[in-house]
Image: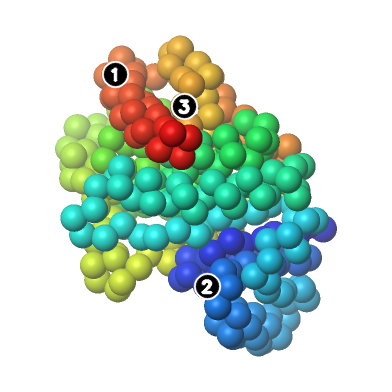
Amino acid sequence: MSKVTIIGATGNVGSYAAHAISNNPHVHEILLYGREGRNALLQGIVQDLIDSFAARGTDINIGWTTNLKESVDTDIFVITAGTPRIPGQTRIDLALENAHIIAPIAQTIGVIAPDSKILVVTNPVDVMTCVALKYSGMKQNQVFGLGTHLDSMRLKSLIAAYFKVHVSEVHTRIIGEHGDSLVPLWSATTIGGIKISNLPAFAHLPVQDFINSVKSSGEAIIRNKGSTVYGPGEAIASLVKTVLGDENRILTVSAYIRAEVHGIGDVCIGVPARINRDGVFPIPIRIDESEVMAFQESVEKIRIITKKVLSNLNP
């Protein structure tokens, strides 16, 4: 049985992730961490969750703290802390701001729980994953980000609706940045085990519309209801379950790659990885030439931003 600590638990994503994670049979304790001054809100969230557990019949321990050192026996940390992007703010400005939040948190985790795993959700997630990896001092397989996992699920849903099949029949991936330079892998997309390009209907698939929809999905949700909650929360819970359940599933997350994708690497970015109790392990893949070029561009974009952020943290 395992313990999960959610950092940034007073936010919408963090609090809902706690509820989604509570369904995990491998979890016996959830600790909600928030900054000083959020005590009453943390207490309220915990009590609300306790009530939901009672109604559902879930036997799980849940508590809260404003002292991260109380999480020493945590198996996996979920970091949702940070500030959201505001209109007119560049991705680099957001990265610089959130890096100053993530770096000290990761550093503390590396000291108090060096054998744990860190799942980064804070945006821009690829850059924040690198910050967490560097400042925690932990092994590369121990630190990963939500990355393009949810993006991949969004594309999967669109394809399933178009072909009128159950979503479980669709297997597809988006690699690269969780952002505008994301790269759909049509070469690795199948429906019912059949390569999508071998289906006559693929010729009429509105590919660019699907890509645009995936890219703008989060922004559209935020515009309509204020924040994305359920999608990220369930995506987080599924990754936590994959780790703690030692499932060895291949999912697309932000992880440090050396040269697994056509020799491209030395950056944290969205790639397919085998995930189990020991962490995340990117798998070597071969993709179409056009996808390689797009992925290279995405990598260079993230590399430049990451370098600027790390330089700012270490002048």
**Alpha carbons under labels 1 and 3: distance apart:** 16 Å
Q: Position of residue 43 (x, y in %)?
A: 63, 83
Residue at (60, 47) in percent of width and height: 106
Direction from residue 185 to residue 232 in the image, left or right: right
What residue is disc 3 on?
Answer: 267
Q: Position of residue 227 (x, y in %)?
A: 35, 68
What residue is disc 2 on?
Answer: 10
Q: SS of the residue at dot 2?
A: loop
The vertical placement of 131 against 56, above or below, is above
Please state which of residues 206 and 55 is positioned toward the viewer in this rendering: 55
Direction from residue 117 to residue 283 in the image, left or right: left
Q: Nearer the viewer, mark 2 or mark 1?
A: 2
Amino acid type of the residue tagged 2 in the rendering: Thr
Residue contact at pointers 3 and 2, CB within 8 angstroms? no
Amino acid type of the residue tagged 3 in the rendering: Val
Q: Residues within 10 Å of mark 2 (few under 14, many from 20)?
A: many
Residue at (39, 60) in percent of width and height: 83
The vertical placement of 283 against 172, above or below, is above
What residue is disc 1 on?
Answer: 293
**Alpha carbons under labels 2 and 1: distance apart:** 40 Å
Q: Nearer the viewer, mark 1 or mark 3?
A: 3
Q: Which callout, 2 or 1, points at the residue further toward the start of the chain?
A: 2
